[in-house]
Image: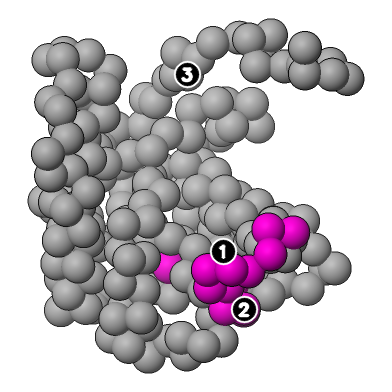
């Protein structure tokens, strides 16, 4: 990896990083700049992830320009409101309500998040692409994206995997000069330092509830 000036890390164990990397929306610090080198360090780590045919068919679009972030956020908010229009309100205080409020907070403040990251897959997969090819292609970038999020966590930053802008993927590609016919956007990741680093394990059902051995029944 490229040698850069070292940045502080949290010193978490592998298991701690894996179990406390949350989707961060309300606890993104909108007031603190993110050094470019930190993003590059995280992408260097992401590039160590396994990839089909050892091909690294990815690119990373990093957006810190305020006007472009605002334009992307406007698209995101329009799609967010359309997706949530008419949806029943969750029970106040419930887990669903907390997620709902968190999502609404991010939609409202997305333009203020200092860094937007769009991972790109060097392929165009439209509707009708065979599922086997889709699985193969996405399998070449998803491990890298998750590794990127884990690397952010270890450095005191957070993000959330969002996809609502993809209904206007072509518009965003034109805004950023991405060759639409050659690259598919894998999502939109708002990146910032987190307000506090004390993220905990989430409440999840045990593995036994989800596992089948050798046959479904």
Circle nearer the N terminus (2, 1)? 1
Q: Earlier in the sequence, mark 2 or mark 3?
A: 2
Residue that badge 2 annotates: 123
**Residue beneath disc 1:** 43
Q: Residue 20: tell me if it is visible.
A: yes
**Magenta segment includes 126:** yes
Q: Is residue 133 above or below residue 213?
A: below
Label 3 sits on residue: 201
* The quarter of the displayed image where residue 163 is located: bottom left
Residue 178 vertical position relative to residue 77 in the rendered view, above or below: below
- The location of residue 49, given as percent across then percent down, is 72, 55
Residue occupying image coordinates x 36% and y 65%? 166
Task: Please report the bounds of the magenta region as a residue range.
Answer: 118-132
Q: Earlier in the sequence, mark 3 or mark 1?
A: 1
Is the N terminus in the top left, top right, bottom left or bottom right quadrant? bottom right
Residues marked 2 and 3 touching at CB (< 8 Å): no
Residue 184 appears at what percent x and percent y? 52, 74
Q: Relative to the observer, which residue lies in front, 81 or 73? A: 81
Specify whether 175 is left or right of 60.
Answer: left
Residue 111 visible? The answer is no
* Secondary-structure class at tag 2: loop
């Amino acid at each position: 990896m490229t040698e850069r000036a070292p940045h502080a890390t949290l010193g978490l164990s592998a298991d701690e990083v894996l179990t406390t990397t949350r989707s961060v929306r309300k606890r993104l610090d909108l007031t603190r700049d993110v050094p470019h080198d930190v993003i590059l360090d995280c992408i260097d780590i992401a590039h160590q992830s396994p990839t089909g045919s050892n091909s690294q068919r990815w690119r990373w679009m990093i957006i810190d320009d305020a006007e472009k972030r605002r334009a992307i956020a406007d698209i995101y908010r329009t799609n967010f409101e359309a997706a949530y229009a008419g949806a029943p309100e969750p029970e106040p205080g419930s887990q669903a309500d907390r997620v709902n409020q968190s999502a609404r907070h991010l939609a409202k403040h997305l333009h203020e998040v200092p860094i937007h990251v769009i991972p790109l897959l060097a392929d165009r997969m439209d509707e009708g692409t065979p599922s086997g090819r889709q699985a193969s292609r996405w399998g070449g970038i998803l491990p890298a994206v998750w590794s990127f999020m884990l690397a952010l966590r270890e450095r005191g930053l957070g993000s959330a995997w969002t996809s609502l802008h993809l209904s206007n993927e072509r518009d965003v590609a034109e805004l950023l000069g991405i060759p639409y016919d050659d690259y598919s956007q894998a999502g939109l990741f708002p990146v910032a330092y987190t307000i506090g680093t004390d993220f905990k394990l989430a409440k999840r059902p045990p593995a036994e509830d989800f596992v089948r051995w050798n046959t479904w029944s």
